Amino acid sequence: MADPDRTDDFPVHLSSGSLRADPAQGWVIPHVWTDEGVVVQTQPNGAGVLHVAVALCVLNDLYRESDALGVPVDGVQVGARGQFDTETWVSTGIDYVVDVASTASADQVAALVARVDEVAEIPRVLRAGMTVERTNA
């Protein structure tokens, strides 16, 4: 688990709908399932962008899967953070937390969150591992 007091820890916070943060505290990106977009709060660096990718994928899939499962979602907050080995800049992992505002039962929301944890594409890709290589093309 990430240590919030370390300088090599890179937290991000994304929010939408009824749980949307004040846009003055971050920047807003358009989002297909939310009229007002998503507020992104993070430091502008590569580590933060990696964590935003995870959080945005989870947020997006919460809306997508809620529609598929018939679970109403009024708002979403996703926080993601992780650390890097400062010698190699290899990630030591990413943790994320989810808060969903919904009129559905706690069990229905828990099932939605569990489903998203299974299907969210960016976390799945990162869990499986991948290569990233520079080409001369």
Image: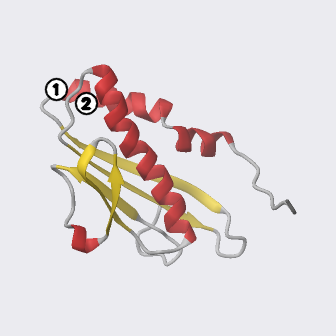
Residue 1 can be seen, yes or no: no
Give the residue furthest to the top: 69
Residue designated by label 2: 109
- Residue 113 coordinates in the image, percent (x, y): 35, 34
Q: Is residue 48 positioned above or below 79 on the image? A: below
Give the residue furthest to the front: 137
Give the residue furthest to the bottom: 7
Give the quarter of the figure containing the C terminus.
Answer: bottom right
Q: Is residue 126 left or right of residue 67?
A: right
- Residue 92 coordinates in the image, percent (x, y): 60, 59
- Under mark 1, the amino acid is Ser
State the SS at label 1. loop
Q: Is residue 70 left or right of residue 95?
A: left
At a point 34% along the width and 49% down the height, the residue shown is: 31
Residue 46's tag is none
At a point 32% along the width and 36% down the height, the residue shown is: 63
Q: Nearer the viewer, residue 102 or 3?
A: 102
Q: How many marks?
A: 2
Residue 34 can be seen, yes or no: yes
Q: Is residue 105 positioned above or below 124 on the image? A: above
State the SS at label 2. helix
Q: Nearer the viewer, residue 62 or 95?
A: 62
